[in-house]
Image (cartoon, rainbow, N blue to C red):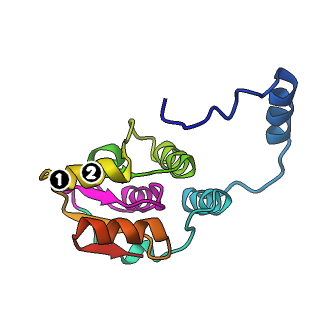
Amino acid sequence: SRWSIDSLADLTEAEGEQLVRAAAASTAEPLDSGAFLRAAARDLGLPAGGAIADLPRTAPGQRVLELPGSGGRIAAWQVANLPGLAFHAQFVFVADTDAERILVGLSASECRANEPTIWTSTEALAALNGGERFDRLVGHSGYEPAARFAAACGQDVRFV
């Protein structure tokens, strides 16, 4: 129900089988989680870089709003590298496109997380204006929708 289109609606049984066989026959080296998510971001046309490790550390009990374009990559890095964090508990994700929602889903899967909370920019701005509190807001500086969101929310945002 989160997708704006059904990308599998026109997929035939034969095409699906061909995709599965091609994936099974792949000889590509397995990637670590961070490299996999960077490659996925790049393939989806989202920011793939950034010095995520330089962001302030999230402590258990803190809440973080991850801006459009990050796709859960910031949360996935912090969950993998900082003890006591849960992807679905500490982080809320702003995603306006299917590409962003796919990357959040891949990030959640890499963290073996429960279903994450995903808001559109409109929902996130309404929540912030309604008093919803986060300990920090984070995003990728080279992604124009994230910059627009940061300007609209009027709060301090840390960018990678």
Mark 2, secondary structure of its residue: helix
Residue at 38 percent across and 48 percent down: it is 120
Residue at the limit of the structure toward the top, as seen here: 13
Residue at 46 percent across and 61 percent down: it is 70
Relative vertical location of residue 60 with respect to residue 88 in this rendering, above or below: below
Residue 123 is left or right of residue 49, and the answer is left
Range of the magenta residues? 59-85
Q: Quadrant of the C terminus?
A: bottom left
Amino acid at pointer 2: Gln
Residue pointed to by mark 2: 90
Residue pointed to by mark 1: 61
Residue at 38 percent across and 36 percent down: it is 114
Closer to the camera, 36 or 8? 8
Closer to the camera, 21 or 154? 154
Q: Position of residue 40 (x, y in %)?
A: 63, 56
The crowd level at tag 1 (other Cα within 10 Å; few <14, some 14-19, many 20+) is few
Q: Position of residue 99 (x, y in %)?
A: 57, 51
Residue at the limit of the structure toward the left, as seen here: 131
Task: Please tell me whether residue 74 belongs to the stretch shown in magenta.
Answer: yes
Residue at 66 percent across and 57 percent down: it is 31
Marks 2 and 1: in contact by CB < 8 Å?
Answer: yes
Closer to the camera, 154 or 118? 154
Relative vertical location of residue 137 with respect to residue 84 in this rendering, above or below: below
Quadrant of the image occupied by residue 76: bottom left
